[in-house]
Image: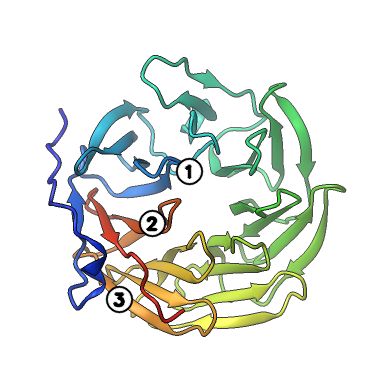
Amino acid sequence: MLVPALLIPWLPASIWEPSSQASSRAAGPSRAPIQGLAFGPDGRTIATSDEAGLVTVWRFDGGWGPARTIEVGDRIGALDFSPDGRGLAVAEGPRGVVLRETGRDGEDRVLTLPFREMLDLTFSPDGRTLAASSLGSSDIVLWDLDADRGRMTLRDHAAPALNLAFAPDGRSLASAAGTIEDRSIRIWDLATGRPRRLLTGMRSSMLAIAYSPDGRLLAGAGAGEKEVRVWDVTTGDQVLTLAGHSLATRSLAFSPDGRLLATAAGDGTAALWSVATGRELRRLDGQADVLHQVAFSPDGRILAAAANDGDLRLWDVGDPGGG
């Protein structure tokens, strides 16, 4: 049974004044920690996955609340909307990747990828390819969704890739591994299938990576690390270190205009940073023990965060300025 959503009246952009509490909060159906979070391209849909094996599709209709739940039965994490918003790819444990239609009447499709127990998955910007990594392999598969077959396999990591991120132009893919044998980020040239650049020197594995919208920067948050690192993709140089959380940063996201970087951390807060200066612009109180995930809406006005209590937090950040 669904837990009724707590729909708090939406606040205007003036939320950017002293109060940093979420302008909307919706109760999760299972109350289990949320591990996966994705904003739909329409800006009015969010998908989450939790440790109880439940995928929830949330919609905004005067307020945010669960509109559809899908019981998967296994602990799940990674999910991603297709760029057109019609499909939702979900890593469903032993079943592998299931491509679910976002409409209730659509048919679900189990992709025939060569491995299961997915760690991460992400759509290419044109929506024709799905990149996926697995717990049981160091390979990364680029899957042709039209033909339902492998388009390319990337092999160079010495350990499974925890995180994947397509460059905005679709020509490169960033992948982050995370074991003692391989604590690195590779930037793959998808024309050749070979690493274009190798980023090393991390103290731990990367829990999250993200490209800036112009593709020039890559941000990464390491396991157990409070700081966020930002690299220039062209040179491989680290150009920013963002420090301010009191516990480890768990998730990050660039705003659609590239001016801001949002972070979520184990201290229960989210933060907004200026990409130009590395300065913290705003601290947002999630009123939670841990924030696991963070994501911007496509127009950049809404910041969503998922917590260990299963609730969804949203802030209307408007335009914070100071970029």
Q: Which mark is residue 139?
A: none
Marks 3 and 1: CB-CB under 8 Å?
no
Amino acid type, mark 3: Arg
Front residue of this view, candidates 56 and 54: 56
Query: Marks 2 and 1, Cα distance to the nearest angstrom?
Result: 11 Å
Front residue of this view, candidates 300 and 54: 300
Q: Between tags 3 and 1, which lies in front?
A: 3
Q: Is residue 281 above or below residue 211?
A: below
Q: Is residue 112 above or below residue 76?
A: above
Amino acid type, mark 1: Ala
Marks 3 and 2: CB-CB under 8 Å?
no
* Residue that appears at 73% across and 55% down: 157
Q: Which residue is mark 2?
A: 293
Give percent across and percent down for residue 280.
40, 82
Q: Which residue is mark 1?
A: 78
Q: Is residue 193 above or below residue 3?
A: below
Q: Which residue is mark 3?
A: 283
Is residue 112 in sight in this rendering? Answer: yes
- For the N terminus, the image quarter is top left
Give percent across and percent down for residue 2.
16, 31
